[in-house]
């Protein structure tokens, strides 16, 4: 599973209004270089610079950096490099979060990712007032989450983040992500998106950059205005895995999650949702409305665990574990709307 690091800044009187986007791309090459990763593909719009890396994704906006890495990458080694960029642009960190799901093969991880204690020590070095949390059963599917919060409130906070990790995907889907050659975004990857159904998740409304790796593996970043989506797929039988993350501002996640599940058909999955109070989903949650993570929204699965943490009123993290039901029903091939929801 993946590791995720996010740094959000606030400008000072000396900060270039372009913030993180004011630095040259060579700076980000240096940042990911400490992970032994390389920038393979770049895509931009009015809000984002999006980078597909080897086994990783990087999203850069004026005020935030999101770095998602797979496998045995040493993500926390990039933190001092990112903080150097914050100093370079003369800004201040107002939020930092690190999260990862429990590892499938923890003995293969490299320092500082041998265990949560080691990771916490590194994070505390840079953010002494940050707090660590565990969401979910320690002996099963769970998340380690660390956050530093220096946001000056009151302010409008409308972010949402939804991440899904899926295991044991349908072999008929997995076979599409093998290739004897590396293929960048083009006719081959477009064919993969069509044949697997990924095009139902990322339709023509998204700007897409995807890569088919050799002998196997697939990564895609997509941006649409202020929205991003990213997926990473490992198709090998003994460890088949797919991830999906987005910040799309919808009030209910059921349609989106079912569309993703309908593509990969995993035997089990975990979803974690970070909710701000002024986001559409945060407003719905505060009213007691369903937000799409409930068992009733996923008839092919049964709920194994649900963890809810409310930091302060309106700021919520929900983590759910689901197992494929033995009495599964047929999937409806959902296609997500092309028009973004604001």
Image: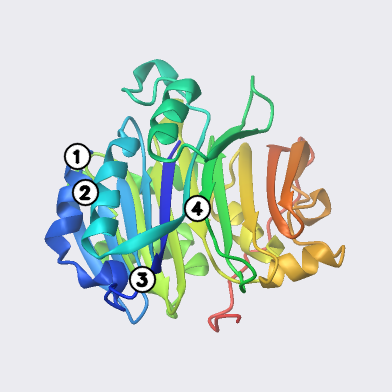
User: Which of the labelled discs sits on residue 58, or is there none?
Assistant: none
- Along the viewing direction, whichever of 126 and 54 lies nearer the viewer: 126
Q: Is residue 258 left or right of residue 218?
A: right
**Cα distance in 3D space between marks 1 and 2:** 6 Å
Q: Which residue in the protein does label 2 denote? A: 31
Q: Which residue is painted at 48% across and 21% down in the image?
A: 117
Kindly indicate whether the residue at mark 1 contacts the one at mark 3 (C-beta within 8 angstroms): no
Instruction: Quadrant for the N terminus, please.
Output: top left
Instruction: Evaluate whether residue 186 shows in this view.
Output: no
Q: Which residue in the protein does label 3 denote? A: 12
**Cα distance in 3D space between marks 2 and 4:** 23 Å
- Along the viewing direction, whichever of 214 and 36 lies nearer the viewer: 36
Instruction: Quadrant for the C terminus, please.
Output: bottom right
Instruction: Evaluate whether residue 159 shows in this view.
Output: yes
Q: Which residue in the protein does label 4 denote? A: 244
Kindly indicate whether the residue at mark 4 contacts the one at mark 1 (C-beta within 8 angstroms): no
Kindly state the secondary structure of the residue where label 4 is placed: strand
Kindly state the secondary structure of the residue where label 3 is placed: loop
Q: Is residue 165 left or right of residue 270?
A: left
**Cα distance in 3D space between marks 3 and 4:** 34 Å
Kindly state the secondary structure of the residue where label 2 is placed: helix
Upstream in sequence: badge 3 or badge 1: 3
Q: Which residue in the protein does label 1 denote? A: 34
Q: Nearer the viewer, mark 2 or mark 3?
A: 3
Q: Nearer the viewer, mark 1 or mark 4?
A: 1
Q: Which residue is painted at 52% across and 40% down in the image?
A: 129
Kindly indicate whether the residue at mark 4 contacts the one at mark 2 (C-beta within 8 angstroms): no
């Amino acid at each position: 599973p993946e590791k995720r690091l996010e740094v959000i800044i606030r400008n000072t009187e000396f900060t270039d209004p372009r913030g993180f986007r004011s630095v040259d791309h060579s700076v980000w090459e240096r940042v990911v270089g400490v992970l032994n990763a390389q920038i393979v593909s770049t895509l931009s719009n009015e809000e984002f610079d999006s980078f597909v890396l080897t086994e990783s994704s990087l999203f850069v906006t004026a005020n935030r950096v999101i770095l998602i890495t797979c496998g045995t990458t040493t993500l926390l080694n990039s933190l001092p490099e990112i903080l150097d960029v914050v100093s370079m642009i003369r800004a201040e960190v107002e939020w930092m979060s690190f999260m990862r799901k429990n590892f499938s093969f923890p003995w293969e991880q490299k320092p500082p990712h041998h265990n949560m204690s080691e990771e916490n020590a590194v994070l505390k070095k840079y953010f002494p007032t940050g707090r660590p949390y565990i969401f979910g059963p320690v002996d099963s599917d769970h998340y380690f989450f660390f956050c530093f919060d220096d946001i000056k409130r009151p302010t409008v906070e409308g972010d949402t983040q939804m991440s899904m990790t899926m295991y044991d995907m349908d072999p008929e889907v997995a076979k599409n992500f093998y290739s004897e050659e590396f293929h960048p975004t083009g006719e081959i990857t477009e064919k993969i998106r069509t044949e697997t159904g990924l095009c139902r998740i990322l339709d023509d409304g998204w700007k897409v950059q995807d890569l088919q790796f050799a002998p196997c593996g697939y990564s895609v970043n997509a941006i649409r205005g202020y929205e991003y989506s990213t997926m990473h797929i490992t198709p090998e039988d003994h460890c088949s895995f797919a991830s999906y993350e987005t910040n799309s501002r919808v009030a209910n996640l059921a349609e989106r999650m079912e569309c993703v599940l309908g593509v990969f058909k995993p035997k089990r999955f975990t979803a974690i949702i970070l909710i701000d109070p002024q986001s559409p989903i945060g407003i719905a949650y505060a009213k007691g409305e369903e937000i799409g993570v409930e068992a009733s929204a996923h008839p092919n699965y049964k709920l194994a665990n649900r963890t809810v943490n409310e930091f302060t009123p309106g700021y919520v993290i929900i983590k759910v574990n689901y197992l494929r039901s033995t009495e599964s029903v047929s999937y409806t091939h959902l296609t997500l709307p092309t028009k973004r929801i604001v």
